[in-house]
Amino acid sequence: MTVRIDEATANAALTAVAPELGTAVTDFMRLAYTGSTVDVVTRELVRIYSGQQTRCRFCSNTRVRGAVERGMDETVVAKVEDFEHSDLPERQRAALRLARSFLLDPAAFGPDDLTALAVHFGPDQIAELVLDLIRLRPGSKLHIATGMDEDVAERILL
Amino acid sequence: MTPALEGLLGARPDYAAGLARIEVALREQQALDPVLLDLCRDRIRSLLGAPGPGLPDRPLRADERACLDLAEQIYVDATGVSDELVAATEAAIGHDGFVVLSYACGLFETTARAELLVEGSAP
Protein backbone atom coordinates (compact mmCIF):
# COMPACT_ATOMS: atom_id res chain seq x y z
CA MET A 1 0.00 0.00 0.00
CA THR A 2 1.26 3.49 -0.82
CA VAL A 3 -0.07 6.47 1.08
CA ARG A 4 0.79 10.14 1.16
CA ILE A 5 1.22 12.15 4.29
CA ASP A 6 1.51 15.90 4.52
CA GLU A 7 3.72 16.36 7.53
CA ALA A 8 6.37 14.63 9.54
CA THR A 9 4.41 13.45 12.54
CA ALA A 10 7.38 13.41 14.90
CA ASN A 11 7.94 17.10 14.26
CA ALA A 12 4.28 17.76 14.91
CA ALA A 13 4.55 16.02 18.29
CA LEU A 14 7.57 18.11 19.17
CA THR A 15 5.91 21.34 18.09
CA ALA A 16 2.89 20.55 20.27
CA VAL A 17 4.98 20.46 23.45
CA ALA A 18 7.85 22.84 22.64
CA PRO A 19 6.77 25.12 19.79
CA GLU A 20 10.05 26.95 19.19
CA LEU A 21 12.02 23.72 19.26
CA GLY A 22 9.55 22.11 16.88
CA THR A 23 9.80 25.07 14.55
CA ALA A 24 13.59 24.90 14.63
CA VAL A 25 13.50 21.19 13.80
CA THR A 26 11.07 21.80 10.94
CA ASP A 27 13.30 24.60 9.63
CA PHE A 28 16.32 22.30 9.85
CA MET A 29 14.49 19.83 7.62
CA ARG A 30 13.63 22.58 5.14
CA LEU A 31 17.22 23.85 5.08
CA ALA A 32 18.42 20.32 4.37
CA TYR A 33 16.91 20.59 0.90
CA THR A 34 17.61 24.27 0.25
CA GLY A 35 20.71 24.68 -1.89
CA SER A 36 21.46 20.96 -1.76
CA THR A 37 24.66 19.92 -3.49
CA VAL A 38 24.32 16.13 -3.20
CA ASP A 39 21.97 14.33 -5.58
CA VAL A 40 18.67 13.35 -4.06
CA VAL A 41 19.03 9.62 -4.75
CA THR A 42 22.31 9.39 -2.83
CA ARG A 43 20.81 11.32 0.07
CA GLU A 44 17.75 9.10 0.06
CA LEU A 45 19.82 5.94 0.17
CA VAL A 46 21.68 7.34 3.18
CA ARG A 47 18.38 8.29 4.83
CA ILE A 48 16.92 4.83 4.28
CA TYR A 49 20.10 3.19 5.58
CA SER A 50 19.93 5.36 8.70
CA GLY A 51 16.31 4.35 9.18
CA GLN A 52 17.16 0.69 8.82
CA GLN A 53 19.98 0.92 11.36
CA THR A 54 17.69 2.75 13.78
CA ARG A 55 14.92 0.21 13.12
CA CYS A 56 12.53 3.00 12.22
CA ARG A 57 9.74 1.73 10.00
CA PHE A 58 8.62 5.21 9.06
CA CYS A 59 12.09 6.14 7.77
CA SER A 60 12.68 2.76 6.14
CA ASN A 61 9.33 2.78 4.36
CA THR A 62 9.25 6.40 3.26
CA ARG A 63 10.19 7.29 -0.31
CA VAL A 64 10.77 10.85 -1.45
CA ARG A 65 9.06 11.51 -4.75
CA GLY A 66 12.05 13.37 -6.22
CA ALA A 67 14.28 10.35 -5.73
CA VAL A 68 11.71 7.94 -7.14
CA GLU A 69 11.36 10.13 -10.21
CA ARG A 70 15.13 9.91 -10.66
CA GLY A 71 15.17 6.15 -10.71
CA MET A 72 15.31 5.12 -7.06
CA ASP A 73 12.99 2.16 -7.37
CA GLU A 74 12.67 -0.75 -4.94
CA THR A 75 15.36 -2.70 -6.79
CA VAL A 76 17.81 0.07 -5.90
CA VAL A 77 16.57 0.37 -2.32
CA ALA A 78 16.99 -3.38 -1.79
CA LYS A 79 20.73 -2.96 -2.35
CA VAL A 80 21.18 -0.60 0.60
CA GLU A 81 21.32 -3.20 3.35
CA ASP A 82 24.29 -5.00 1.79
CA PHE A 83 25.54 -2.08 -0.28
CA GLU A 84 29.17 -3.12 -0.13
CA HIS A 85 28.45 -6.18 -2.23
CA SER A 86 26.01 -4.44 -4.54
CA ASP A 87 26.39 -2.87 -7.95
CA LEU A 88 25.39 0.56 -6.69
CA PRO A 89 27.63 3.28 -8.14
CA GLU A 90 30.86 3.80 -6.21
CA ARG A 91 29.79 7.32 -5.28
CA GLN A 92 26.68 6.02 -3.54
CA ARG A 93 28.60 3.27 -1.84
CA ALA A 94 31.09 5.87 -0.57
CA ALA A 95 28.23 7.85 0.96
CA LEU A 96 26.83 4.69 2.54
CA ARG A 97 30.27 3.84 3.97
CA LEU A 98 30.24 7.22 5.66
CA ALA A 99 26.79 6.47 7.06
CA ARG A 100 27.89 3.03 8.25
CA SER A 101 30.90 4.46 10.06
CA PHE A 102 28.83 7.25 11.55
CA LEU A 103 26.14 4.93 12.88
CA LEU A 104 28.28 1.98 13.93
CA ASP A 105 31.78 3.15 14.85
CA PRO A 106 32.49 6.81 14.12
CA ALA A 107 35.83 6.87 15.91
CA ALA A 108 37.14 4.29 13.45
CA PHE A 109 36.60 6.64 10.50
CA GLY A 110 40.18 7.63 9.74
CA PRO A 111 42.03 10.03 7.47
CA ASP A 112 42.19 7.44 4.68
CA ASP A 113 38.40 7.05 4.83
CA LEU A 114 37.96 10.79 4.51
CA THR A 115 40.34 10.87 1.57
CA ALA A 116 38.36 8.11 -0.14
CA LEU A 117 35.12 9.98 0.48
CA ALA A 118 36.60 13.19 -0.90
CA VAL A 119 37.22 11.48 -4.24
CA HIS A 120 33.46 11.63 -4.77
CA PHE A 121 32.31 14.57 -2.66
CA GLY A 122 33.50 18.12 -2.09
CA PRO A 123 33.68 19.75 1.36
CA ASP A 124 30.20 21.23 1.07
CA GLN A 125 28.80 17.85 0.07
CA ILE A 126 30.54 16.04 2.94
CA ALA A 127 29.14 18.67 5.30
CA GLU A 128 25.70 18.06 3.85
CA LEU A 129 25.94 14.30 4.32
CA VAL A 130 27.17 14.65 7.91
CA LEU A 131 24.40 17.13 8.68
CA ASP A 132 21.90 14.67 7.22
CA LEU A 133 23.24 11.98 9.53
CA ILE A 134 23.02 14.31 12.53
CA ARG A 135 19.45 15.23 11.55
CA LEU A 136 17.90 11.90 10.67
CA ARG A 137 18.25 9.65 13.70
CA PRO A 138 16.80 12.03 16.33
CA GLY A 139 13.53 12.19 14.41
CA SER A 140 13.54 8.42 14.00
CA LYS A 141 14.09 7.84 17.70
CA LEU A 142 11.40 10.32 18.67
CA HIS A 143 9.03 8.59 16.28
CA ILE A 144 9.78 5.21 17.81
CA ALA A 145 9.86 6.25 21.47
CA THR A 146 6.52 8.02 21.25
CA GLY A 147 4.85 4.99 19.71
CA MET A 148 4.18 6.60 16.34
CA ASP A 149 6.14 3.91 14.53
CA GLU A 150 3.80 1.06 15.42
CA ASP A 151 1.19 1.51 12.69
CA VAL A 152 3.26 2.61 9.74
CA ALA A 153 2.10 1.91 6.20
CA GLU A 154 4.10 -0.42 4.00
CA ARG A 155 5.06 2.45 1.76
CA ILE A 156 4.87 6.22 2.36
CA LEU A 157 5.41 8.61 -0.54
CA LEU A 158 6.41 12.18 0.31
CA MET B 1 30.01 21.01 19.34
CA THR B 2 33.76 20.85 18.83
CA PRO B 3 35.59 23.45 16.70
CA ALA B 4 36.64 20.68 14.31
CA LEU B 5 33.03 19.68 13.67
CA GLU B 6 31.99 23.32 13.33
CA GLY B 7 34.72 23.71 10.76
CA LEU B 8 33.56 20.77 8.71
CA LEU B 9 29.88 21.73 8.83
CA GLY B 10 30.74 25.32 7.97
CA ALA B 11 31.13 24.26 4.35
CA ARG B 12 27.31 24.11 4.26
CA PRO B 13 26.60 27.24 6.34
CA ASP B 14 22.84 27.64 5.97
CA TYR B 15 22.14 24.03 6.83
CA ALA B 16 24.61 24.17 9.75
CA ALA B 17 22.90 27.30 11.04
CA GLY B 18 19.69 25.30 11.25
CA LEU B 19 21.39 22.87 13.58
CA ALA B 20 22.70 25.73 15.71
CA ARG B 21 19.16 27.09 16.05
CA ILE B 22 17.94 23.73 17.29
CA GLU B 23 20.62 23.74 19.98
CA VAL B 24 19.50 27.20 21.10
CA ALA B 25 15.83 26.19 21.06
CA LEU B 26 16.63 23.08 23.04
CA ARG B 27 18.38 25.20 25.64
CA GLU B 28 15.49 27.67 25.85
CA GLN B 29 12.47 25.34 25.75
CA GLN B 30 10.27 25.26 28.85
CA ALA B 31 9.22 21.60 28.89
CA LEU B 32 12.32 20.13 30.54
CA ASP B 33 15.00 21.47 32.86
CA PRO B 34 18.20 22.00 30.82
CA VAL B 35 20.15 20.51 33.72
CA LEU B 36 18.41 17.20 33.07
CA LEU B 37 19.21 17.51 29.39
CA ASP B 38 22.87 18.10 30.21
CA LEU B 39 22.92 15.05 32.43
CA CYS B 40 21.58 12.88 29.61
CA ARG B 41 23.93 14.47 27.07
CA ASP B 42 26.89 13.63 29.30
CA ARG B 43 25.67 10.07 29.75
CA ILE B 44 25.20 9.47 26.04
CA ARG B 45 28.63 10.94 25.29
CA SER B 46 30.08 8.61 27.89
CA LEU B 47 28.36 5.59 26.32
CA LEU B 48 29.84 6.57 22.95
CA GLY B 49 33.31 7.08 24.37
CA ALA B 50 33.28 10.80 23.64
CA PRO B 51 35.02 13.25 25.98
CA GLY B 52 32.85 14.56 28.81
CA PRO B 53 32.29 14.54 32.55
CA GLY B 54 30.12 11.40 32.69
CA LEU B 55 27.73 10.92 35.57
CA PRO B 56 27.97 13.11 38.70
CA ASP B 57 29.73 11.63 41.72
CA ARG B 58 26.69 11.85 44.03
CA PRO B 59 23.38 10.07 44.54
CA LEU B 60 20.95 10.79 41.71
CA ARG B 61 17.50 12.27 42.28
CA ALA B 62 14.47 10.33 41.11
CA ASP B 63 13.88 12.62 38.11
CA GLU B 64 17.53 12.34 37.11
CA ARG B 65 17.40 8.55 37.32
CA ALA B 66 14.18 8.45 35.30
CA CYS B 67 15.68 10.64 32.57
CA LEU B 68 18.83 8.54 32.45
CA ASP B 69 16.83 5.33 32.21
CA LEU B 70 15.05 6.70 29.15
CA ALA B 71 18.22 8.16 27.65
CA GLU B 72 20.08 4.88 27.96
CA GLN B 73 17.24 2.88 26.42
CA ILE B 74 16.84 5.31 23.53
CA TYR B 75 20.57 5.20 22.93
CA VAL B 76 20.76 1.40 22.96
CA ASP B 77 17.52 0.72 21.07
CA ALA B 78 14.57 3.06 20.89
CA THR B 79 12.29 0.18 19.96
CA GLY B 80 12.85 -1.11 23.50
CA VAL B 81 11.12 1.89 25.08
CA SER B 82 8.28 0.16 26.88
CA ASP B 83 4.96 1.52 28.05
CA GLU B 84 6.27 1.15 31.60
CA LEU B 85 9.35 3.22 30.84
CA VAL B 86 7.25 5.90 29.20
CA ALA B 87 4.94 5.97 32.22
CA ALA B 88 7.84 6.19 34.65
CA THR B 89 9.46 8.99 32.69
CA GLU B 90 6.25 10.94 32.32
CA ALA B 91 5.60 10.56 36.05
CA ALA B 92 8.96 12.20 36.69
CA ILE B 93 9.10 14.93 34.05
CA GLY B 94 5.67 15.05 32.41
CA HIS B 95 4.60 14.19 28.89
CA ASP B 96 6.09 17.33 27.38
CA GLY B 97 9.41 16.64 29.01
CA PHE B 98 9.31 13.07 27.76
CA VAL B 99 8.82 14.18 24.16
CA VAL B 100 11.59 16.77 24.32
CA LEU B 101 13.98 14.33 25.96
CA SER B 102 13.22 11.64 23.39
CA TYR B 103 14.22 13.97 20.58
CA ALA B 104 17.17 15.44 22.46
CA CYS B 105 18.71 12.05 23.19
CA GLY B 106 18.90 11.32 19.48
CA LEU B 107 20.45 14.70 18.80
CA PHE B 108 23.03 14.29 21.57
CA GLU B 109 23.96 10.93 20.12
CA THR B 110 24.34 12.04 16.51
CA THR B 111 26.22 15.19 17.43
CA ALA B 112 28.68 13.17 19.50
CA ARG B 113 29.01 10.66 16.66
CA ALA B 114 29.82 13.48 14.26
CA GLU B 115 32.44 14.84 16.64
CA LEU B 116 34.09 11.45 16.94
CA LEU B 117 34.02 10.93 13.19
CA VAL B 118 35.60 14.31 12.45
CA GLU B 119 38.18 13.98 15.18
CA GLY B 120 39.22 10.53 13.99
CA SER B 121 39.55 11.59 10.37
CA ALA B 122 41.77 14.59 11.08
CA PRO B 123 45.16 14.18 9.39
Image: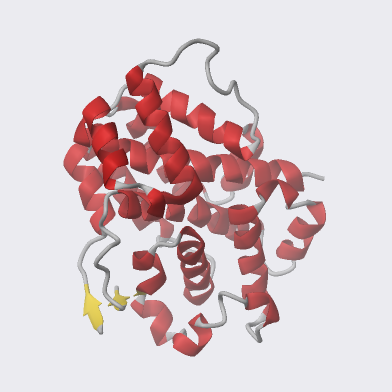
- Residue B69 on image: x %, y %: 41, 33
In the orientation shown, which residue stands out farthest toward the front? B84
- Residue A57 on image: x %, y %: 37, 67
Name the residue located 27 percent from the left edge and 63 percent from the top edge: A150
Could one spot residue B99 in this view of the protein?
Answer: no
- Residue B57 on image: x %, y %: 55, 12
A77 or B93: nearer the eye?
B93
Location of residue B106 (image quadrant): top left
Up-down relation of residue A144 to residue B36 (above or below) = below
Q: In the visual, does A74 lie left or right of A99? A: left
Q: How many marks?
A: 0
Query: In the rendered image, which quarter contains the N terminus of chain A?
Result: bottom left
Up-down relation of residue A120 to residue B105 (above or below) = below
B116 or B80: nearer the eye?
B80
Location of residue A32 (image quadrant): bottom left
Q: In the visual, does A153 lie left or right of B8? A: left
Could one spot residue B89 in this view of the protein?
Answer: yes
Name the residue located 34 percent from the left edge and 79 percent from the top edge: A65
- Residue B82 on image: x %, y %: 32, 47
Query: In the rendered image, which quarter contains the C terminus of chain A?
Result: bottom left
In the orientation shown, which residue stands out farthest toward the top? B58
Name the residue located 31 percent from the left edge and 39 percent from the top edge: B85
Scheme of image coloration: secondary structure
Name the residue located 41 percent from the left edge and 70 percent from the top edge: A60
Up-down relation of residue A110 to residue B62 (above or below) = below
